[in-house]
């Protein structure tokens, strides 16, 4: 398996929705490719942080400015 193939199915691998035969190839690649291992580890950590995160209420003024800035940027696209 090449890095590009690994990255193409990264989401399915992290979510555990990948064919077990491909999973073996995936693990073999990760065992010998540090850059891909770093990517997969970062994705897993991000998912863990997101799942464990608490909701945080933004101050109204900040939220309004953020929404306005995002709308302006979206319109410019």
Image: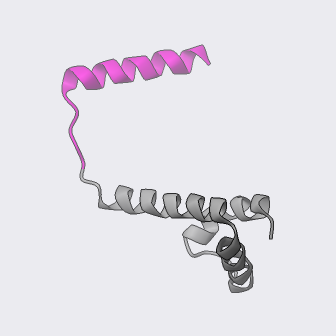
Spot occupied by residue 64 in the image (x, y as percentages of width and height): 29, 21
Q: Which residue corresponds to the image point at 61% horizontal and 75% vertical from the top-left?
A: 17
- Chief SS of the magenta region: helix
Instruction: Please tell me which residue is depicted at 20% across the width and 25% down the height of the picture.
Output: 60
The quarter of the displayed image where residue 29 is located: bottom right
Q: Is residue 36 above or below residue 63?
A: below
Residue 65 in the image, given as x and y percentages of width and height: 32, 18
| Residue closest to the eye, 12 or 6 | 6
Image coords of residue 59 (percent x, y): 19, 28
Name the quarter where the C terminus is drawn: top right
Magenta span includes 43: no
Indicate left or right for 51 with 62 as reference. Answer: right
Q: Position of residue 47 (x, y in %)?
A: 44, 60
User: On screen, 25 above or below 37?
Assistant: below
Look at the image and tell me in which quarter the N terminus lies.
bottom right
Residues drawn in magenta: 55-77
Q: Quadrant of residue 35?
A: bottom right
Q: Could you say which quadrant of the image residue 28 lies in? A: bottom right
């Amino acid at each position: 398996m090449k890095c590009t193939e690994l990255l193409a199915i990264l989401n399915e691998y992290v979510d555990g929705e990948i064919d077990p035969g491909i999973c073996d190839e995936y693990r073999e690649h990760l065992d010998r490719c540090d850059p891909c291992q770093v990517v997969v580890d970062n994705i897993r950590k991000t998912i863990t942080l997101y799942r464990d995160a608490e909701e945080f209420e933004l101050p109204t003024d900040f939220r309004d400015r953020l929404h306005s800035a995002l709308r302006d940027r979206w319109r410019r696209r």
